């Protein structure tokens, strides 16, 4: 446990000293929140577009930000793996679980900080726009989105373990695009229906967005929160176990 | 009789059809520094990887301080240190943070980060990020990180690769100091380095141990003066090898 925390601390410090992590994990999601709010204010009310309303946008942006947590997890793991740093650590008493959770824990912390910042921004925007975002919902969502942060970190961990520094970020961008497109962040997937909706419902991203939105609305209805949360939780656990397995296997084969 | 730090018996490693290490048998006494020499692809690094439980042998057995490297890797890992060919440091951490990190990883019986800083003369660079260090200082840091866990056996894989002559000599002095308290296995392509630092020298050719002994042994065997000439003679097969 001590070694896991020591490794987590190292990973957090390394990430906190990388300017790009601030740009992608904090500034970019907040910028998108502001831009989309401006877009929303330009859409006539008669058009009936609710996707970019701050109560919908805040939850979507929380999940959007987490996709970059996945990207940075993948980059961190791939970078360590391709250098000799991990080889050195493999020769120490560290166990596979120390590595896996040592990478994931700081990413959960980053995701937590990220959602707090985007929720604070969303709250300010809601006050400026005169709309009502519940403070209790915003507070609740900071915790309720953590399972999806775990899910994205685990995906990043798997990509970082299996692929090199060049391939892993590329694959993450596919997930980022896919997550945004069929995760219901930028448009109403269920409203579109058809194949898109069917595909979206087979993947966990839409459920992650639903959880975030429902938490912000303090809406615990079965279809809006409980079922999506169950899907996200199960996916996060399965992917974390898979990440541990993949990393352990790679650890034995890497050198 | 000298106590053995490392005992290797018929260690073999294959990558596909290629034999990287072929029936290697070797013994290293406690407190000795041995150099593993050989041309590229001779099996030096693979041998180190097997001895540090980083890779499994296909056959044979190795023991470090009486522990089976493969079956008792949990007991081996706290007592070995490794400095790899590439400088294995956390680039965004400072010198002190890197050393503190390794100290915390070993925690039981490890050296304090400040003690390692002092030991390796890194005081001036204490708060400098590893990525801002020159090649020589980064190497020093990398070796310091390998000894923070107070290893009984230290593996240095080409520790002075790419360093200028001054930085190399400085590192030699550090390695000399470590010799007193640690058993060291060093791989290098620099003959003068092996000659200056080693108690014994092992020459590997295509995964096989071709010669092993003191510098005097190798000189006697080859009839050549100096390690470089003796090494060339062994590698070119111009002499009968000690086995």
Image (cartoon, coloured by chain):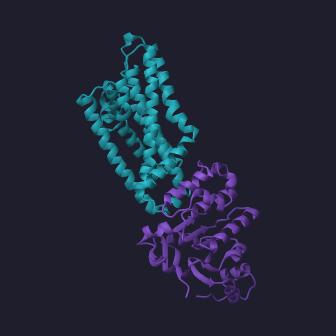
Chain colours: A cyan, B purple
Quadrant assignment, res B71: bottom left
Q: Is residue B120 left or right of residue A37?
A: right
Residue B153 visible in the picture:
yes
Name the residue: 38% across, 53% down. A244
Position above or below: B19 against B124: below
Name the residue: 58% across, 51% down. B97
Residue A145 location in percent, x, y? 37, 35
Residue A30 location in percent, x, y? 49, 27
Total marks placed: 0
Residue B122 location in percent, x, y? 67, 56
Position above or below: B232 against A48: below
Q: Quadrant of the N terminus of chain A?
A: bottom left
Q: Is residue A118 left or right of residue B173?
A: left
Residue B53 location in percent, x, y? 47, 68
Residue A188 visible in the picture:
no
Name the residue: 50% across, 22% down. A35
| Viewer-closest of A27 and A92 | A92
Q: Residue furthest left?
A: A222
| Viewer-closest of A180 and B165 | B165
| Viewer-closest of B58 and B15 | B58
Q: Is residue B242 left or right of residue A160?
A: right
Position above or below: A98 against B219: above
């Amino acid at each position: 446990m001590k070694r896991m925390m020591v490794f987590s601390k190292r990973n957090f410090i390394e990430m906190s000293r990388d300017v790009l992590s601030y740009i992608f994990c904090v500034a970019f999601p907040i910028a998108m929140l502001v831009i989309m709010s401006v877009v929303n204010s330009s859409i006539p009310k008669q058009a009936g577009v609710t996707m970019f309303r701050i109560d919908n946008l805040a939850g979507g942006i929380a999940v959007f930000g987490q996709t970059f947590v996945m990207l940075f997890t993948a980059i961190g793991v791939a970078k360590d793996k391709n250098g000799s740093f991990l080889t050195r650590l493999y020769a120490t008493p560290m166990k596979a679980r120390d590595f896996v959770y040592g990478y994931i824990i700081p990413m959960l912390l980053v995701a937590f900080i990220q959602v707090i910042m985007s929720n604070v921004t969303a709250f300010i925007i809601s006050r400026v726009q005169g709309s009502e975002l519940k403070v209790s919902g915003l507070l609740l969502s900071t915790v309720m989105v953590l399972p999806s942060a775990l899910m994205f970190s685990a995906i990043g961990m798997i990509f970082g373990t299996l692929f090199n520094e060049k391939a892993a970020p590329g694959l993450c961008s596919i997930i980022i695009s896919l997550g945004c497109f069929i995760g219901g962040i930028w448009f109403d997937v269920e409203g579109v229906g058809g194949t898109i909706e069917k595909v979206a419902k087979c993947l966990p991203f839409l459920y992650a967005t639903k959880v975030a939105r429902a938490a912000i609305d303090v809406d615990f209805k079965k279809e809006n929160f409980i079922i999506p949360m169950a899907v996200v939780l199960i996916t996060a656990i399965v992917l974390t176990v898979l990440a541990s397995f993949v990393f352990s296997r790679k650890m034995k084969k890497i050198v | 009789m000298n106590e053995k730090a490392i005992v290797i018996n018929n260690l073999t490693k294959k990558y596909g059809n290629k034999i990287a290490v072929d029936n290697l048998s070797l013994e290293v006494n406690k407190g000795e520094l041995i150099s593993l020499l050989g041309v590229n692809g001779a099996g030096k690094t693979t041998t180190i990887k097997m001895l540090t439980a980083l890779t499994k042998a296909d056959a044979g057995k190795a023991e470090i301080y009486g522990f089976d490297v493969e079956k008792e890797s949990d007991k081996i890992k706290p007592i070995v240190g490794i400095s790899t060919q590439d400088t294995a440091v956390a680039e965004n951490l400072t010198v002190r943070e890197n050393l503190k990190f390794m100290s915390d990883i070993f925690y039981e019986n490890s050296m304090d980060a400040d003690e390692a800083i002092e030991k390796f003369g890194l005081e001036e660079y204490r708060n400098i990020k590893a990525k801002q260090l020159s090649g020589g200082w980064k190497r020093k840091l990398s070796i310091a990180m390998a000894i923070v866990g107070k290893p009984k056996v230290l593996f240095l894989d080409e520790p002075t690769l790419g360093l200028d002559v001054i930085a190399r000599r400085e590192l030699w002095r550090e390695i000399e100091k470590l010799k007193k308290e640690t058993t060291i296995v060093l791989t290098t392509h620099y003959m003068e380095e092996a000659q200056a630092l080693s108690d014994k020298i092992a020459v590997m050719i295509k995964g096989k141990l071709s010669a092993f002994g003191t510098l005097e042994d190798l000189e006697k065997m080859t009839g050549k003066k100096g390690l470089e000439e003796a090494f060339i003679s062994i590698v070119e097969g111009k002499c009968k090898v000690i086995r």
